[in-house]
Amino acid sequence: MRRLRWGWVAVAAIPMVFIGYFFVYPLVRILGLGLSELSIGASGVEERLFRVGWFTVWQAVVSTILTFLAAAPLTWAVSTFQFRGRRVAMALATVPFVMPTIVVGAAFVALGFDESVVAILAAHVFFNVAVVVRTVSTLWSRIDPRILDAGRVLGASNWQVFRTLTLPLLRPALAAAASIVFLFTFTSFGVVLILGGFQYATLEVEIYRQAVDLFDLPLAATLAVVQLVGVSGALYWYSRYQERTAVAWTLERGTNLRRPRGRAKWGVATAVIGSLGLLAIPLGVLVGRSLSASFYRDLFSDDRVIGTPIASVGNSLLFAIIAMVLATSIGVLAATVITERSGSLSRWFDLTLMLPLGTSAVTIGFGFMVALDWPVDLRGSYWLVPIAHALVAIPFVVRSTVPTLRSVPAETREAAAVLGASPFRVWREVDLPLITRAGLIGAGFAFVISLGEFGATSFIARPNTATIPTMIFRLLGQPGASSLGMAMALSVVLAALTAGVVLTIDRARFGELGSF
Amino acid sequence: MRHTRQLTALIVALAIAVAGCGDGEPEQTGTPETLTILAHDSFADAVNDETFATFMEETGIAVEVLGGGDAGSMVNQAVLTKDNPLADVLFGIDDTFLSRAIEEEIFVVHESSLIDVVPESLREPENRVTPIDYGDVCFNYDKEYFADSGLDVPADLDELTADRYAGLITVEHPATSSPGLAFMLATIEQFGEDGWLDWWGEMKQSGINVVSDWETAYYTDFTRYGGESPIVMSYASSPPAEVIFAEEPLDEAPTGVIEAGCYRQTEYAGVLSGTDYTKSAGELVDFMLSVEFQERIPETWFVFPANQEAELPQTFVEHTIIPDDPADLAPELIAENRDAWIDEWIAVMEG
């Protein structure tokens, strides 16, 4: 068994060192710096803090619930049925996820949403539907239909089957999706600023305001700690829940999709067309504004002021590939560690990996700047961009891999071991094929996150390498009809690129499944 | 055991690769190979190979520019890293953030050899920072709207409270937007600390529209882009930008600048106190004040050169005005009162 242990340490060390050096260490340094100067007692602070904290929590909870309700029809359709355009529908549903908040915010305002809570919630749903659809359908589509058929044979109605069989089996994926959507909306920044105005600040907005505008680092650090405690609390509860409720059951090798017949046909059509139609309305605004051949042509011309806008596509793709490789390899190793070792250490490790999602971008960005000058000065390096993207993407890889790994019954591994397989061989033969598939979903997410990420990177000092969202922001920052048109055209390019990438990854994933 | 060894080798290789990415050159005094400027993104994004080419030819020193986010984020990074600075020169700090930086002593005094070409009003008295450019935040109006409606373009801020302009004006929120803050400061200067909130109170009555950022104000609420406000808070350089970034070539700017209620933001460069190359860094700041660099400023960053000897490009001469007497407040006054003013503003506008 000694061999296992050493291999184990190596597997665990890589993600731990990465997350330790690029997340925990900068976090401790920046919070330490802020808290060391802390003097509590400024008047009126507590009241605002309470108000902001309360708003942050309830809008995140409500956004998460609404996102699930909105995503339910599409998730049901793509998880149960095989129909023409299914993959395209899933790819299109992913597009909102990467859209820059500034573009979506403008589209919502143009649609007549005034600054209000309703606008914030609607935008949160718009952005996060993809998280639910993709995370849940992965598991749902592979539920063994015989289990459900058994239920029906025993006389259960469709609803009873769903409630007593499907839903409990889906719990790990539902919980995973909920935790991600919750964290995303808990730390919402751009949406809240643009669509909420000043009266609806989240902790994230308040941290930015205190640190960047008012230079109150101690107060910002205090708020960051409050945010971290809140996020950790939610995550701790989640991981306990996940461990308690995980049911080991054999996943089907392939997906179990039926062709819709009769009434189901109409149901699927309504769900898919209705969901995509709603998601398409804000996107339609920007497509409409981009409609002029000259805007698209100008993306290729070298403007002396902003360079060639289309060059940002190359930068974005390069960063996205690096971030994807980093996040997928580290995330898969971490997921292996988490699933194979139960107990409090593994639980804390899992929680730490999720934390970057719930940590404010200012904290991560400034943390990099105060911490990463040792042992090598990485500040001001190109590498910080994909590393920051990877930090945000790792939780997605972990969350899409862990439920799949957990569902492997221990007996399968034991059987392999009894038959004489080495621990590595067990891992290669039993876990790896499953990991590959789940990892590909995570990889897709990582790629897409990197394409759309804007927040954390804007707080990192880095050489000028405009990504697509940065370029859109820059175009929108200059007055002129052509600037606006090009910004919208580039947003459409980003949407098309995202759909294309997701479609390709899905195809690779299902292609591989077919070969089993 | 074999796997362990492979893994160990892999980790070691990775560590070496990562270490190799940093530059391992030893510290040296005298002339550096590269000088680094930490700037806000809107400056950094527009830098190209030509921007500092002349400086490099003359001194043999390469210039690298790091974008540090928006102005506030950049200043914070400079303050947080003052013991081991990210850069040799900081560029793009303005009045609203200057006090904080000076308090933290992140700059060394540098009296530029070219400082005489800069008007007195823009200079920092102790030369801890050197003014490089200025920009005026001003109301813009939609010429077509005013021509069609027959309304007169308002001439001062008091006139804006009149019924005929009710519901036609959009400004940005002072807590979330830099032009929004600048305009709030302009009203404080014009009406005094006793009177400014009354003006805002009247504007609230007449239905002034407040949005979170410039992009929304300009591209969503401005009548020129399909919105409902023919008057929006923007920049004096926006009309020339409309001409330069027009869809079809334009003879005349479609928008104009209202001279009342303008606020002047000056942007400074400073030599960071942690640099090993104070002298070369000072020369770089001087280069940024040279006529060659200064004449590049308007069409690259859409602000105005601090050097009075620099000539403005034709589009800027034709399509905008430089207000005679824009407001500007002392950095210390802003630093001291900013938060309280914003709270008072919120109490009136959102209370």
Image (cartoon, grey):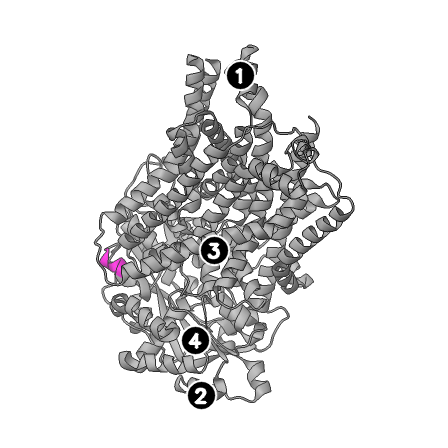
Indicate which disc residue B162 carries: 2
Q: Which residues are magenta?
A: B100-104
* Label 2 SS: loop
Q: Which residue is tagged 3? A: B45
Farthest front residue in view: A155
Give the alpha-carbon distance from disc 4 to disc 2, as whole Å: 19 Å
**Depicted A228 relative to depicted A199: above or below:** above
Inspect the image, locate mark 3, and give the three-letter code of the amino acid beneath it. Asp
Q: Nearer the viewer, mark 1 or mark 4?
A: 1
Q: Chain of mark 1?
A: A
Q: Which residue is mark 4?
A: B138
Q: Residue at 23% of width from left, 58% of height from top?
A: B103
Estimate how packed mark 2 is, as few (under 14), some (14 to 19) or many (20 or more) residues with alpha carbons within 10 Å: few
| Residue A210 among those drawn in magenta | no
Question: Which disc, if any, is residue A414?
Answer: 1
User: What secondary structure is found at the residue carrying circle 3?
Assistant: loop
Q: Nearer the viewer, residue A436 or B70?
A: A436
Mark positioned earlier in the residue sequence (4 or 3): 3
